[in-house]
Amino acid sequence: MKNIMEIKFKYLLITFLILVNTIAGFSQNTKPDGWYQFRGPNRDGISTESLSDINWSETKPELVWKKELGSGFAELTISDGIIYTMTSEIVDSITGFEYVAAFDENTGNELWRSQVDSIYFDVDGWGNGSRSTPIIDENQIYSFSGHGKLSANSLKDGTLNWQIDFVEEFGTTTPRWGFASSPTIVDDVLIMEVGGTDSRAFMGFNKKDGSINWSSENGNASHDSPLAATIDGKEQIIFANGRKLFSFTSTGDTLWTYNMPFGSLTAIPILIDKNKIFLSGVRTPGFIIIEINGNTATEVLNGNSMKNDFSSCVYRNGYIYGYHVAALRCVSVETGEVSWTKRGFGKGSLIMVDDKLLVLSDKGKLAVVKATPDAYTELISFQAIEGKSWTAPSFNNGKVFVRNLTEMACYNLK
Amino acid sequence: MKQITKYTLTSLLLIVALITNAQTVDEIITRHRNAHGELKKWDQVESMKITGRFTAFSVEDDFFAIKTKDGKYYSELKLGQFDVIEAFNGETGWTIDPWQEFTFPRELNKSEQNVFLQKAEFFTPFYNYKENGCEVELIGKQVVDGIDVYAIKLIRTNGHTETWYLDANTYLEYKRESRWVDFAYGVPAETYFDDFREIDGLIIPFLTEKTFWQRDRVLQIENIEFNVDVDENVFTMPKSAEIEKLAFLIGNWGVRVNAWSGRANRWYKADSTSSTIDYIATNLIQEKISFIDFFVQSNITNFGYSSSESKYFSTTYSGFSSEIMMMNGVFTDSTFVLNNVKIGCDTSQASIQIKATYSNITEDSFTLGIEQSGDNGKSWNPWVQLIYGRMKE
């Protein structure tokens, strides 16, 4: 009898604990599924899906759909069967608009679009429209226009819920080629590189109404996006701004700063293992790796074998894969030595799915390449999209999504 | 004795090594040249016409270039959103490159001249490096991007050095490190060569990728024609389109100078003189003249065009008063009118304004009328009139 009671009690206790954990999990882990933000679920360019059970010699990528899309460089973010991105429409040579828009993942058909700003016309002809990638949250999508307006729109129908003009509100100077930083969300705080005056370089916003949670530090708006990751056991938001690296908690407390030997980075900081950060730009040195212990950052390696321009690297098992200016490379993070180099992709982009690199050339050729330091091994390649393609692919439900300045396309790789 | 023998032996080995090294450089270069086809055939090539696709800023567009055996180079390409023209006569050259925010031709600077020496080569500088006065030095055998290469240092006569990496198996060029230019500023560059194809027995890299700073430029050749007719005029720097409109000024002129008599209310002949007007730069015309109206006026006048202001301007340096007068204006309806403008820090209103009008323009003559105004241009009074007639050769 006692045993039965004990068993019942244990059962109830376990059920209760599971329930508590589940509720706690729901309240803490509100991250959407899918490729829901800049560079995917973990902001590292790596999908959590698998591509390992494919016989590549027999695989022929299937075009699921291809649709016209206005100009812009935002990645295609995807969750719950819907693609969200930024697009634009030119009215005449001096007029146009930027939109956040939603599309059906299976068909590419537009579901809604909401105007968020006037269009950003690029001064050098690189391409008009937004440079920043939106982030999908529970009920809203947050986007950042080329002219510096942060907007929150309803996921359901695109209704604009709130908007902040960084130039007007915070005195931010528009960077040459427009605002490009992509928002991130940590602990329900919407975090942005603002570049405002009066210690408003970095800010945290209440994601529900856009009210200010915190602001900190001085610095101009750059083209770089913050990294949000658990480093040395702590959730940290890392900004590379000017020649300085900043680490914050989601409540805006500075954990540490580090003076970099270079500045003006565009490629996002990359987390290596648990407590190292890879940073790269086109200057000399081309990259540094710093190690975080406690709240101290120390350089452990630098070199010139990887020089990222606007395209960010991915990391796997001791090796960085990315663009050394315009050459695809695999570089050891232990030694900085080059394992292999492959030219022909121009200034393209890449992401990683499982142990495969999905490499998109700057003219829209997509290649699946083994993520191994042994040799450049291409499994398949095909012309996925035409023309200038500077936006990195997205991956969701076994499909790869690409865009350029005029259209977007979806391919089934399985 | 033993020590002397050791010393002799070491010296001998060193000399042998040096000789071997020198032979090796020559041997490698000979093999490299042979890898590009028979030298006899290359010697018969006087010119090359290249067409293809050029990629800059990830945008691909048409490319056209001419190369000549004596080192001339001309090309038309699209660099991003702008059409660019480049020309090089083997020593100097010109370009129209709107990226530098002007659209008229300009001369190449020294850094660019070094770039165009590289662009003008039929394949590599080793084709005729000795005749061209280049020096070479074998750095050694290396591995670049997993490829065994011979690294050779090349020193050009202009003092610039380049490092060439020749594939140790094919002896064709794999990579070059050299000085290049980014917006006319000298920068280090890496160039990679690929897609070697045979045309009429000659081997040429059809794909060239160049990276410098964060730039990436790719040339994919589609067709090459040898020994085409070359229009030598393309290597001469043209004048800017706007300054070309003032071509009527160019020449050696006989000039009748009339001065205005206010009392008599008529012109009277003050002097007969001569003038020489010529281009002194792509966007600049200069006149030298000395005449007497009452005093002896020895003037040098420069005419130019400001694309930012969409106006012509002239600056006259007076040898009589040592003063400078600047004027600007427009050329409309066959009449070229300039008004004086204030220069320097004095912002006070000029008491007398001057207007120069070039009219009655024909192939062999024109008239320059100079008027004065004492009421801010409300009324104008004649001052001097110069009637230009072209002098016979």
Image (cartoon, coloured by chain):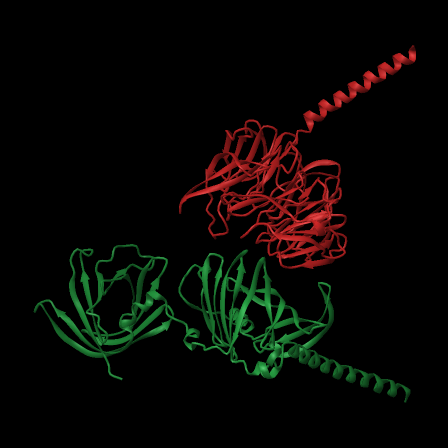
Q: Is residue B132 in view?
A: no
| Quarter occupied by the N terminus of chain B | bottom right
- Looking at the picture, how far across and down is residue B28, in whole percent? 70, 78
Vertical placement of residue A79 versus B273, above or below: above
At 87% across and 85% down in the image, what residue appears?
Answer: B6
Q: Is residue A233 left or right of residue A347?
A: right
Q: Is residue B348 left or right of residue A333?
A: left
Quarter of the view holding residue A363 = bottom right
- Looking at the picture, how far across and down is residue B215, in whole percent? 57, 59
| Quarter occupied by the C terminus of chain B | bottom left
Of all residues, the one furthest to the front in this rendering is: A58
Vertical placement of residue B308 versus B365, above or below: above
At 71% across and 48% down in the image, what residue appears?
Answer: A356
Chain B tint as drawn: green
Q: Nearer the viewer, residue B224 or A90?
A: B224
Q: Nearer the viewer, residue A407 or A269?
A: A407
Chain A tint as drawn: red
Vertical placement of residue A213 versus A263, above or below: above
Q: Nearer the viewer, residue B280 or B21?
A: B21
Of all residues, the one furthest to the top in this rendering is: A1
Q: Is residue A231 left or right of residue B117?
A: right
At 45% across and 77% down in the image, what residue appears?
Answer: B230
Of all residues, the one furthest to the bottom in this rendering is: B1
Quarter of the view holding residue A184 = top right
Q: Is residue A31 in view?
A: yes
